[in-house]
Image: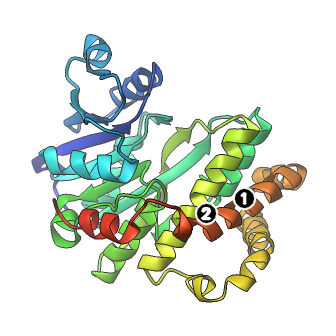
Amino acid sequence: MVDLTKKRISVVVPSYKPGKEILNCLKHIFAQETEIRFDVTVVDSSPEDPAMMIRKVFPEVTVIHLPQRTYPGKARSIGAQRVRGDIICFTDVDCVVDKQWMNRLLEKQKQGYKIVGGSVCNGTPQSVFGTAEYITEFRELNPGVRPGEVTAVASCNLAVDREVFESIGYFPDFMKAEDTIFCEYARTHGYKIFFNPNAKITHMNRTSFTAYIRNQIYLGEGEVEARRWTKRYGSFLIAYPFLLPLVPLYRTWMTFKCFLFSNRVLLFKTIGLYPVILLGFIAHVWGFIRGPYKAGISTEKRFEANIRKD
């Protein structure tokens, strides 16, 4: 067992135009019912520095303000490099962490796991589009999924031992799927990833149709990058794009299968919202198609520059 009393814990929160949402996020981080000592760093790339607003309420928070818009993966990497923690926990501005969040993440670190992720709850259950986004993006991370070793977890609910970063580098500079790529690289280096559903956060999903579809497109772009740079399942679709129209059917099957065994409430919600969910699946495929062809973005350069230590 690892003695966490001798470990320093840091929490990193990437931020962009957070508004007052960042204060709610930080309030719940500091409401942890834990004896573990930790520090918190916000890495923000907004046009206007929110440091004064944050420090007025939470003077103990370190705010790193970046001069230009930075994707979450890069922001997390910068934070992970600058904090002093032996174990670094990550969450996002649009998330509310449970009071036992840190305890539950770190209990598996005590058992020797270097990468531990937790579950994601639906923060917009009354919204059609918010619930559809939750179902399409976080189905495999719902609290009903059994604990155990997995291939990937989400960076909005994640604890990583510094040893991992020193061994394989940091998150790549992508808007989406940077956590999937990071986890795949960690696995190829022999690190095991544990999913603990008791380490809960609540995600505030997008609640407008336009934002929901846009996010699905971005997720599709991230998925193609994940498959370009790793051996993650589905990589063959890059070589055989004519199979992409079948992907919504496959994702439909996987969604129903997941909820059948993990969360019957979400299963029935998926049935009721399926037309909206299907539109999201189609938008996701479009993002997968257009991802490699977006003008002005050298993904090779961005990837190689950011997966390594800066």
In the figure, is residue 180 to the left or right of 210?
Answer: left
Q: Which residue is disc 2 drawn over?
A: 220
Give the x, y percent position of residue 171: 32, 60
Query: Quick one: 247 or 253, which is closer to the camera?
Result: 247
Tag 2: amino acid = Gly
Q: Which mark is residue 31?
A: none
Q: Residues within 10 Å of mark 2 (few under 14, many from 20)?
A: many
Q: Which residue is disc 1 drawn over?
A: 283
Residue 107 sits in quarter: bottom left
C-beta proximity under 8 Å, tags 1 and 2? yes
Tag 1: amino acid = Ala
Colour treatment of the image: rainbow
Q: Is residue 210 above or below residue 220?
A: above
Q: Is residue 297 visible?
A: yes
Q: Is residue 112 visible?
A: no
Give the x, y percent position of residue 25: 42, 29
Query: Quick one: 308 or 143, which is closer to the camera?
Result: 308
Give the x, y percent position of residue 169: 22, 67
> Could you say whether the residue bearing mark 2 is in a helix, strand or loop?
helix
> Which of disc 2 and disc 1 is earlier in sequence?
2
> Could you say whether the residue bearing mark 1 is in a helix, strand or loop?
helix
